[in-house]
Amino acid sequence: MHLTSVIRIAFYGGIFAILGSIAINCQSANPQDEQAAEGQRLAQQYCGTCHLPVDPQALDKQTWHKRVLPTMAPKLGLEVWQTNHYYQPPSATISLNDWNKLVAYYEENAPAKPRSTKPQKSSPDWAVFELVKPTTKANPGSEATTTLVAIDATSGQIYSSSETAPALTGWNASLSPSRLAALPSPAVQAVRTTTTGGTSELVLTCIGTMLAVDQPIGEVMALNLNEPTRPPVSLARQFPRPIQSVPGDFNRDGRTDWIVCGFGHNSGGLYYLKQRPDRQFERVTIKNVPGATQVIPGDFNRDGWLDFMALFAHADEGIWLFTNNQQGGFTEENVLRFPPVYGSTSFQMVDFNRDGKLDILYTCGDNSDYSRVLKPFHGIYLFLNKGSHRYEQAFFYPLNGCTKAVATDFDLDGDLDIAAIAFFADLKEAAPQTFIYLEQQKPLAFAAHAVPIHAYGRWLCMDVNDWDQDHDPDIVLGNYAKGFLNEAGLRPTWNSHVPLIVLRNQTRNPSAKTLADLTNHQ
């Protein structure tokens, strides 16, 4: 036999052996594994084009079956009736056969019940804070629906607004209220600025409507603090549910421009208001998608031009860097992405590990959309800056329904602590964690203080600043007492009338009561 024949026989013999092995393996393969792989492929193909695909384990079977999948089907052109029956019209972008495979993938691989959050150890104490409550209510007899709290450290005043009474209210050092201005809709953010002419202004972002609808009736308004009796003037109108406006001279012409986050609903956007010499504004759309939530400006590439980071919290959730192109526009780059079930709520840029680079403190916990169950991935995240716009997760603290976190040195010991609120906390608990204070004791190791304020309200908004002007940071919390309840039959146990409270920091100036208590215990 020729050598070539031996090689040929050996070659084909090997091929036959391999093919035989493949055939045997195919016959013995688990059909469920094949279905899961096919479902995962379809999820990547049809869901991953709009946002990060969601793992079936993220939600329970019932939530996928009754709420999320029936909501997603129309986005692919399918029609839905009786909650979870589907029909494929000619315009659908997915076949009914593939959709059924996708549904089976999620429902068969999801847990039977929602995954629970592992309880965290915390101390029910006041830490460095004492409670200060208003002496009177801003709107006596009405239910608290506070949408804005902001500390003006310059004047020592607190500003607030509410859904039921769309006005701007000021609270003095004794927390006595006074009505400052009528507003067309609830204010959700306030920024104190100074014009080029030296006028102090309070710029207000008015949301238009708290309802999740597509109504572009929000606006940005300015109140002259030098003449507070004059009504506020509108800087720009017809925004889709704007929730933040951030000032900055983005084109270096010496005038203050604004970036406006129009969260919207099905439509929304991120907008650039360029100020003209006549103090009118030219509106430019930077990104035409809903979910714009928060902007933090800064010269991130150190070229002398102002850039900004932006958080988007609808569908394709994440944080993007918008770099100033020095020609009146911006180029965008994603730095962090999150699945659409996260419900992103806030972020802060702060140097946590003292390496000279800004890290990202991020929270997620919005639970008012289609999957209204407690989620173990809701909470507080810290991503450390590794350079070249790369961030790596270094810390996570689970907190059901987390709404906002602020890092600063509350106890003045030289490191950063964290205060956080959770509007969608587990409200069935005897003492819901609607507020948590994380005291940093060593690098990224925190002692959790469950400050006992859950009975005083349900906290939708928070601001941190030096309210009493004693050079330590205080906290004001806004109470939105009604609605947005995900637990069937839940009866609110919190105060529904007090619009806000202050957690006064006692680090520099303990109260007389606290000093007396300390004396009595010595």
Image (cartoon, rainbow, N blue to C red):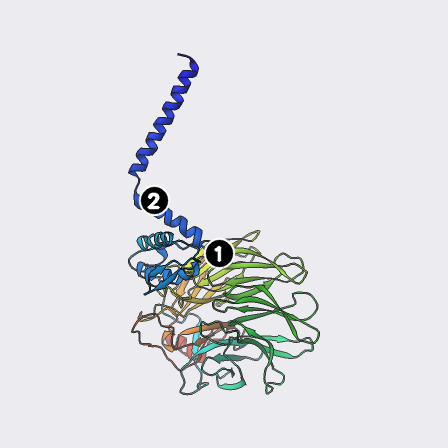
The vertical placement of 232 against 94, above or below, is: below
Q: 18 left or right of 192? A: left
**Residue 280 appears at what percent x and percent y?**
66, 75
Q: Nearer the viewer, mark 1 or mark 2?
A: 2
- The kind of secondary structure element at disc 2 is helix
Q: Nearer the N terminus, badge 1 or badge 2?
A: 2
Q: 285 left or right of 186? A: right
Of residue 11 and residue 153, the one placed in the foreground of this image is 11
**Residue 64 appears at what percent x and percent y?**
34, 59
The vertical placement of 2 against 180, above or below, is: above
Can the viewer see residue 351 in this picture?
Answer: no
Tell me where residue 136 sits by quadrant.
bottom left
Q: Residue at x 62, y 85 (%)?
A: 227
Q: Which residue is mark 2?
A: 34
**Mark 1 to mark 2 CA distance (whole Å):** 28 Å
> How packed is label 2: few (under 14 Cα within 10 Å), some, or many (20 or more)?
few
Q: 193 left or right of 41? A: right
Q: Which residue is mark 1?
A: 337
Q: Residue at x 49, y 61 (%)?
A: 361
Q: Quadrant of the N terminus?
A: top left
Of residue 214 and residue 444, the one placed in the foreground of this image is 214
Can the viewer see residue 148 in this picture?
Answer: yes
